[in-house]
Image: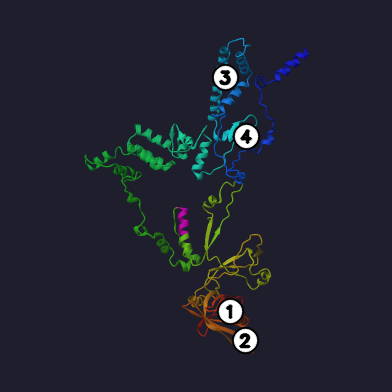
C-alpha cells in the first residue's frame, strides 16, 4: 500500500500538457541571460551600426507582426502543432497503416476523421491567433510576445514577464501626443490609417480620431445641451444659454458651436424686427440675422440703457486711429524720458496701466530701447530638477508674474563705487584691478545736485560703509571686459562742467599735435603736454601733467599713421582762461 501511494503521488505531479504533448527540443535558457535583449526591454534602434560596414546597405524595416502565423508559415507550423498531440499522432499512424496490407479498416474510414479533426483544430488555432492579435494594445504587446530579431516578428511569450513602455511625449508636440494616446487605447492596429479609423470613418489626423473615441475633453457636451434646449426652448432662451456657456464654460471651438446652432438662436429675430419696425414684409439675410442675434443694442443687466451709457472714458484719452499709439502714450506719460529716466521722483509720479503682463513686457521693451547705450542681455539658467523631459526651450518660454523673463535686457548697467577716506586703508589692500568681487552690506546714494563732484552718468553710486563685506569671486566663472567706456560727446563737455561732473570718458581724433611745456611752480621744475582732440564738430583742449604727460609723449613718438584716435578714460573737467579743458586724473588712462 505504501508503494502504491508513492506511485500515485508521482503521477499527480505529472502535468497533463507533458503527458499528451511532445515537448519541443529547445535549450533551457535562463531568463537572466535574456535581459537587455529584444522582448525583455523596450529598446528601439533607428538602425544597426554594424550594417554600415557592409555593402549594399541593409536596414531593418519597421514591419511588426504580433500574430503567431503568417500565410507562408501557417500550414507547416499548424500541422506540427496538431501532430504534437498524441491523439492526432495515433490517427496519423492508423491512416498510414490503412494503405498497407496490415490495415484492419479501409483507408477512407481512417483518413476522413483525421482530416476532419486536424482541419477543425487548425481553423480554431487561426481564429484564436487572430483574436489574440486584436485584443492587445501597442504597449501590451511586449507583455505577451517576445521580439525575434532574426525574423523581425513577435513570437508568443512562453515564460517570464515584461512591461511595455512608450516613450514620453509632451502635449505641446500635438500630433505625436495624440498618436501616443491612440496607441494606448486602440487594440490590434495594423497601420496609421487604422488608428485614425473610428466606426468605419477615417479621420484626417490623430487629434480628430481622439475626439471621436472620446479621449479628449471636447465640446460635445455643450453641443448636446444646446441641441436639447432647442427641442423645447425659445430662441431667446437658447441665446441666453449660449452666452452662459461662452462666459462660464471652457469651449475649445466657440466658432463651431455657434455655426452648428446658429439657426436655432436666430429663429425669432425676423419676427421681432418686423414687429418693432412695423414692416411685415421685412427681409433679412443670414448674416444680418446673425448680427442681430450677437448684439441687439441693449445691455441685458440694465433697463433701457445703451452701450454708450457705460463708456465713461473721455474721447480725448482714446487713441484709436494713430498707428503709433503706444509710442505716443509713452511720450505723453514720460516726457523728456532720456533726460530724467534716472530720477526716482520723476519715475514715481508716472505709470502706464495695462490689462496683461504680455502688454507690460512689450511697453517696457519699447521704453528700454529709448535709453542711450548698449543693450546687455542676461539669460537665466533653466533646469528641471529630476524631470529632464522638459526641454530648455519650453522652460525659457514660461513667463511667471513676479519673476524676470528668461532674457533680461538692461542698459547703462555701469555704476561707480565710492569709498570714504577713513575707510580707504581697510579696502585698499583687498582691491585689485581686473578682479570680480561680491559686495554685501553697502548703501546706495543719489546725487542731489549740491555736491561739488558728479563723476558718473548715473544719478546713483555705491557707497562703502563700515559693515561692507568684500569677497573675491572665484567660482562663478564670469568674464567681464577689462576695458569698458561710458563715452560722452565732446559737445556736452561744457554742460557737464556746469552739472559738476568731473570724470568722463571721451573719444576724439588728434587735431593739434602735442606740445611739451616746462615751467616752475614753487621753485619746482614741472612740465605738461597740451594738445587738442575733435569729433568733427567740437574741439576740446587737453592737458596732461608730469609723468602721465611723459608716458603720453613716449606713446606718440612711435610711428603712428594719421588719423590718430585717442580714447581718454576718467578725464577730469577743468576750466582754464574761461575755457573748458580736460586734464588727467589719478586713475586716468588713454588708448
In which image quadrant can residue 543 be found? bottom right
- Foreground mark, 2 or 4, reads 4
| Mark 4 vs mark 3: in front | 3
Badge 3 vs badge 1, beta-carbon distance below 8 Å: no
Residue placed most toward the observer, 466 or 70: 70
User: Is residue 361 on the magenta stretch?
Assistant: yes
Mark 2 packing: few (<14 Cα in 10 Å), some, or many (20+)? some
Mark closer to the chain start, 4 or 3: 3
- Residue that badge 4 annotates: 162
Residues marked 2 and 4 touching at CB (< 8 Å): no
For residue 446, what is the image quadrant?
bottom right
| Above-or-below relation of 24 to 386 | above
Residue position for label 2 = 526
Q: Does residue 576 sit above or below 567 in this rendering? A: below
Q: Badge 1 local density, few (<14 within 10 Å), some, or many (20+)?
A: many
As helix, strand or loop, the secondary structure at mark 4 comes to loop
User: In terms of sequence position, does the residue under pointer 2 or pointer 3 come before the other?
Assistant: 3
Residue 28 sits above or below residue 515 on the image:
above
> Of the residues under marks 1 and 2, which one precedes in the sequence?
2
Image point 51% across, 41% down: which residue? 177
Q: CA distance from mark 2 to mark 3?
A: 123 Å
Q: Which residue is mark 1?
A: 584
- In which quadrant will I find the C terminus? bottom right
Q: Which mark is residue 118?
A: 3
Among all residues in the image, which is located at the extreme right? 2
Separation of residues labelled 3 and 1 (CA atoms): 111 Å
Residue 521 horizontal/vertical position (percent):
62, 88
Q: Which residues are magenta?
A: 356-364
Counting residues from the start of the chain, the first of labels 2 and 4 encountered is 4
Q: Residues within 10 Å of mark 3 (few under 14, many from 20)?
A: some
Amino acid at each position: 500500500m505504501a508503494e502504491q501511494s508513492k506511485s500515485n503521488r508521482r503521477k499527480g505531479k505529472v502535468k497533463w500538457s507533458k503527458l499528451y504533448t511532445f515537448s519541443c527540443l529547445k535549450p533551457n535558457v535562463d531568463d537572466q541571460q535574456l535581459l537587455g535583449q529584444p522582448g525583455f526591454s523596450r529598446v528601439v534602434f533607428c538602425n544597426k551600426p554594424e550594417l554600415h560596414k557592409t555593402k549594399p546597405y541593409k536596414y531593418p524595416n519597421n514591419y511588426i507582426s504580433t500574430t503567431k502565423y503568417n500565410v507562408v508559415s501557417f500550414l507547416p507550423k499548424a500541422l506540427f502543432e496538431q501532430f504534437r498531440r498524441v491523439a492526432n499522432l495515433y490517427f496519423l499512424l492508423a491512416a498510414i497503416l490503412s494503405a498497407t496490407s496490415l490495415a484492419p479498416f479501409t483507408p477512407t474510414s481512417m483518413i476522413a476523421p483525421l482530416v476532419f479533426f486536424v482541419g477543425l483544430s487548425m481553423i480554431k488555432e487561426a481564429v484564436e491567433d487572430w483574436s489574440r492579435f486584436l485584443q492587445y494594445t501597442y504597449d501590451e504587446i511586449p507583455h505577451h510576445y517576445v521580439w525575434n530579431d532574426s525574423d523581425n516578428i513577435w513570437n508568443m511569450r512562453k515564460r517570464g514577464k515584461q512591461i511595455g513602455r512608450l516613450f514620453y511625449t509632451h502635449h505641446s508636440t500635438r500630433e505625436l501626443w495624440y498618436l501616443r494616446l491612440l496607441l494606448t487605447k486602440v487594440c490590434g492596429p495594423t497601420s496609421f490609417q487604422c488608428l485614425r479609423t473610428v466606426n468605419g470613418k477615417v479621420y484626417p489626423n490623430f487629434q480628430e480620431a481622439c475626439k471621436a473615441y472620446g479621449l479628449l475633453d471636447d465640446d460635445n457636451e455643450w453641443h448636446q445641451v444646446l441641441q436639447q434646449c432647442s427641442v423645447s426652448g425659445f430662441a431667446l432662451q437658447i441665446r441666453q444659454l449660449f452666452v452662459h456657456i461662452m462666459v462660464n464654460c471652457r469651449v475649445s471651438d466657440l466658432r463651431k458651436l455657434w455655426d452648428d446652432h446658429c439657426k436655432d438662436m436666430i429663429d425669432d429675430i425676423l419676427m421681432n424686427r418686423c414687429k418693432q419696425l412695423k414692416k411685415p414684409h421685412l427681409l433679412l439675410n443670414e448674416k444680418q440675422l446673425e448680427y442681430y442675434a450677437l448684439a441687439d443694442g441693449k445691455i441685458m443687466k440694465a433697463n433701457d440703457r445703451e452701450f454708450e451709457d457705460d463708456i465713461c472714458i473721455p474721447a480725448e484719452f482714446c487713441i484709436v486711429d494713430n498707428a503709433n499709439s503706444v509710442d505716443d502714450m509713452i511720450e505723453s506719460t514720460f516726457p523728456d524720458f532720456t533726460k530724467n529716466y534716472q530720477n526716482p521722483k520723476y519715475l514715481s509720479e508716472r505709470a502706464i496701466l495695462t490689462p496683461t503682463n504680455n502688454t507690460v513686457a512689450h511697453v517696457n521693451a519699447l521704453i528700454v530701447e529709448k535709453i542711450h547705450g548698449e543693450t546687455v542681455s542676461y539669460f537665466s539658467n533653466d533646469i528641471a530638477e529630476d524631470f529632464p523631459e522638459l526641454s530648455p526651450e519650453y522652460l525659457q518660454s514660461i513667463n511667471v508674474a513676479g519673476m524676470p523673463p528668461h532674457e533680461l535686457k538692461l542698459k547703462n548697467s555701469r555704476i561707480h563705487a565710492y569709498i570714504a577716506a577713513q575707510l580707504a586703508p581697510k579696502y585698499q589692500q583687498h582691491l585689485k584691478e581686473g578682479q570680480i568681487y561680491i559686495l554685501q552690506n553697502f548703501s546706495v546714494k543719489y546725487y542731489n545736485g549740491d555736491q561739488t563732484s558728479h563723476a558718473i552718468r548715473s544719478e546713483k553710486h555705491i557707497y562703502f560703509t563700515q559693515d561692507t563685506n568684500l569677497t573675491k569671486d572665484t567660482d562663478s566663472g564670469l568674464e567681464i571686459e577689462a576695458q569698458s567706456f561710458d563715452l560722452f560727446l565732446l559737445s556736452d563737455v561744457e554742460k557737464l562742467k556746469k552739472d559738476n561732473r568731473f570724470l568722463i570718458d571721451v573719444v576724439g581724433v588728434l587735431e593739434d599735435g602735442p606740445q611739451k611745456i616746462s615751467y616752475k611752480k614753487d621753485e619746482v621744475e614741472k612740465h605738461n603736454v597740451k594738445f587738442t582732440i575733435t569729433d568733427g564738430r567740437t574741439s576740446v583742449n587737453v592737458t596732461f601733467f608730469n609723468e602721465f604727460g611723459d608716458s603720453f609723449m613716449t606713446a606718440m613718438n612711435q610711428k603712428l599713421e594719421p588719423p590718430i584716435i585717442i580714447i581718454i578714460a576718467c578725464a577730469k573737467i577743468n576750466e582754464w582762461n574761461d575755457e573748458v579743458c580736460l586734464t588727467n586724473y589719478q586713475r586716468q588712462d588713454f588708448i
